[in-house]
Image (tube, rainbow, N blue to C red):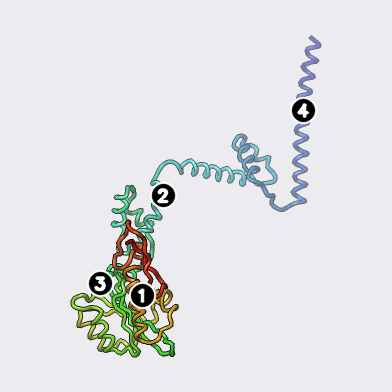
Amino acid sequence: MAGLANLLFGYVWRSFQSRERLKAEIIVLRHQLNILRRRAPKRPRLSGCDRALFVWLHRLFPSIVGAITIIRPETVIGWHRAGFRAWWRWKSCNLGGRPKVDRELRDLIRRMCEENALWAAPRIHGELLKLGFTVAQSTVSKYMLRGRRPPSQGWKTFLRNHADSIAAVDFLVVPTLTFERLFAFVVLGVGRRAILWIGVTTNPTAPWLARQITEAFPWDTAPSFLIRDNDGAYGKVFTRRVRSMGIRDRPTAPRSPWQNGYVERVIGSIRRECLDHVVVWNEAHLRRVLDAYSHYYNSTRTHLGLHKDAPYLRPVEYRGRIVARDILGRLHHQYCRM
């Protein structure tokens, strides 16, 4: 009996000593923290893991607030509340609501808006429904381009819509062997990019230009529109002749050759593919050279804008022997089957 009492007394004494030792260690640790705070009065920098540890301990043991010394208790409580709000926000973000719009659909809405200046949200919404997209009209309005200019018809749209009834004219200046200047008046049909007429002279006056227009469009072949620049050679005689033929004169803006780009491109082709390789003797020589090149240009030369076809619909040949015909002294060749 005495031995059991001694064993129990020893266990209680050791337990008392362990608790007293823990209390002593806690006092020593707190005192060390106080010393460190006096030496480093600045606010301590805590990582995210440190904050999470304090929040987790506070959630399990709220009484530890009184034991915290390096930070204020209100700070730990604020961290806990901020974490709760973040957790609840993350939990609530996947509860449904309006579905997100795919990037493909957003890009398609903007593309339709750019390519169709006359379309509003209902028109674009109808096209999207026909393409199999399930989207609200308000969503289409949200992703449409803002600040669009009022619908207007630019030169590019005008030319595309009226290409078959538009002719374009311009001058080509060619020096001769004796340094004399010759003027070639080029008339181009915009629809098939065909050279309709080339007139050559040394003095392009308004009556001469009016006569060239008459010869380029005999009978009822006159186009509806005529595009030209603001050259001073076009006088009142030319303007009256054009109007009498039922042609609407459309001068380009000053210093804007791109508005008459089709005929400018043809003149560039005439220079690069013909005149840059020929020394012109006189007016008759230039006329023969330009006639030969215009025949080659219209009936043989393929064009990228015409899907690799010629202005005068060159047929595809499958049978026969391939024969080459010289054009402009072997400067170009025409290949056909015989």
| Amino acid under disc 1 | Tyr
- Of tags 3 and 4, which is closer to the observer? 3
x then y, percent, for residue 301:
36, 68
Labels 3 & 2 near each other (Cβ < 8 A): no
Q: Which residue is mark 3?
A: 165
Q: Which residue is mark 2?
A: 102
Dot 4: few (<14), some (14–19), or many (≥20) neighbours within 10 Å? few
- Give the SS element for disc 3: helix
Is residue 259 visible in the rendered image? The answer is no
- Write the residue at 69% across / 49% down: 44
Q: Is residue 117 left or right of residue 57?
A: left
- Write the residue at 26% across / 76% down: 225
Label 3 to label 1: alpha-carbon separation: 24 Å
| Amino acid under disc 4 | Ser
| Amino acid under disc 2 | Asp
Tell which of 180 and 236 is nearer to you. Answer: 180
Q: Which residue is mark 1?
A: 293
Tell me which numbered mark, 3 or 2, is placed earlier along the sequence: 2
Tell me which numbered mark, 1 or 2, is placed earlier along the sequence: 2
Label 1 to label 4: alpha-carbon separation: 113 Å
Dot 2: few (<14), some (14–19), or many (≥20) neighbours within 10 Å? few
- Of tags 3 and 2, which is closer to the observer? 3
| Figure check: 3 above or below 110 | above
Label 3 to label 4: alpha-carbon separation: 108 Å
Tell which of 80 and 293 is nearer to you. Answer: 293
Dot 1: few (<14), some (14–19), or many (≥20) neighbours within 10 Å? many
